[in-house]
Image (cartoon, rainbow, N blue to C red):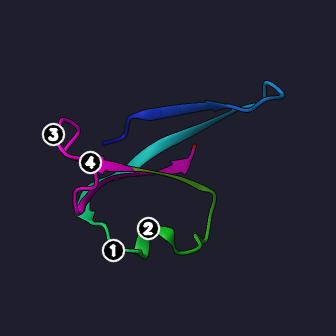
Amino acid sequence: MDEEITVEDVRGRVTHYRVREVAVVDRHATRFLDPADSPQLTLITCWPFDAVQPGTPLRYVVTADRA
């Protein structure tokens, strides 16, 4: 982990995040959507990346804390 993600908003403001967790979870796992105690970024996409059919039951989740 410990990789950095840089996000730039439409006004040009830059925010840095440090990856804390990467997980492959069932699409019904909702704990990643719960409110956080501190600023964080959660990225969610379908898994596996090269799936032949869309809509698989798995999700790839990256959680990062504001650096």
Q: Are marks 4 and 3 in contact (CB under 8 Å)?
A: no
**Mark sitting on residue 14:** none
Q: Amino acid at mark 1?
A: Ala
Q: Are marks 2 and 1 in contact (CB under 8 Å)?
A: yes
Residue sitting at x 30%, y 42%: 1
Relative horizontal placement of residue 33, taking residue 60 as reference (left or right): right
Residue type for callout 4: Pro
> Is 63 contained in the magenta span?
yes
Q: Are marks 3 and 1 in contact (CB under 8 Å)?
A: no
> Where is residue 17 shown, x and y percent of the image?
54, 41
Between the C-alphas of marks 4 and 1, the distance is 18 Å
Mark-to-mark CA distance, 2 and 4 = 21 Å
The circle drawn on residue 32 is 2
Q: Secondary structure at mark 3?
A: loop
- The quadrant in which the C terminus is found is top right
Q: Which residue is mark 3?
A: 52
